[in-house]
Amino acid sequence: MVTAPVEDPVPDSQFAPAENRVSSQWRHKDLRLGFDVFFGIIAPLLCVYFDPGLLNGNSVVAPHLLGSLRLFVYVEIGLGAAVLAYYLITRRNSSWLAGALFAGALFAFFVGILILPLTLVMLLVLIGIPGLTPFFTGYVFLRNARQCWQQSPAGKHAYRALPVALLSTVLVLGVPLSLQLSANRLVNRAQTAIRTGSGQEFDRALETLRRIRFAVYIDTGRMARDYQRTTDSVLRARLAQVYRMLTGDAIENYLAD
């Protein structure tokens, strides 16, 4: 007797109601949206708010690691969060927006690589996991930039739209970086004037530091040590004045600790 071959059972998923498949797709989209919002917007802002000293110089392990790029970091994180939020809300696809999102990815990967040695060291004591956040953020921006590019009309005419996307990337990264470099030069000149300038140059330098102290980390600890080492009474008075302006405290209190 010949036995008919037994066919493999049809997976239950083929009989699943269409409503279930649609619901599963929506759950997947919701999870991806939550991932993008957290790692693309919330986590970078939290890293700035709970800065472990990489921007403000309070870290014992790597003080002011990003201090000379403080303004650049602030602007890029704020701009990137705004651009990503706009895209996630509107889903408007364009080469210009794709370039801006790609700039956010480049910035996030740059920060992640810059702090990677510190992150690896801190992972040994299980407190370096937040240092991996920039890589997740970079992934979020890169994936959304790719999606924005592919779903935009520009994706079908890359040879014409690519210059627009590249220009957007250069502007989003270049303008804040140019502002940062200008601020760094102003701070360096002001610090030189504090030590060697005339009375009027010192007053101008003090005002310059007062206006842009948020943009660049200024090592007040080094300033206090210079105050302690020097015997020049004029320089000591200037350093004490600058220190009080920057910290709101007397330089003697720092040295006494």
Image (spheres, rainbow, N blue to C red):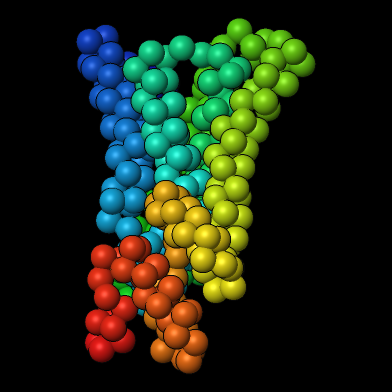
Compared with residue 236, is residue 174 higher up or lower down, i.e. above or below? Answer: above
- On the image, the x and y values in percent for residue 105 come to 53, 39
Q: Residue at x 33, y 63 (%)?
A: 245
Residue 28 is drawn in which quadrant?
Answer: top left
The quadrant of the rendering that contains the N terminus is top left
Viewer-proximal residue among 187 and 113:
187
Compared with residue 145, is residue 106 higher up or lower down, i.e. above or below? Answer: below
| Residue 129 visible (yes or no) | no
Q: Residue at x 59, y 36 (%)?
A: 175
| Residue 104 visible (yes or no) | yes
- On the image, the x and y values in percent for residue 230 come to 49, 89
Compared with residue 136, is residue 61 higher up or lower down, i.e. above or below? Answer: below
Which residue lies most toward the front here? 199
Residue 127 is drawn in which quadrant?
Answer: bottom left
The quadrant of the rendering that contains the C terminus is bottom left
- On the image, the x and y values in percent for residue 110 come to 56, 51
Q: Residue at x 69, y 15 (%)?
A: 161
Viewer-proximal residue among 34 and 190:
190
- On the image, the x and y values in percent for residue 100 come to 54, 28
Which residue lies most toward the right here? 159
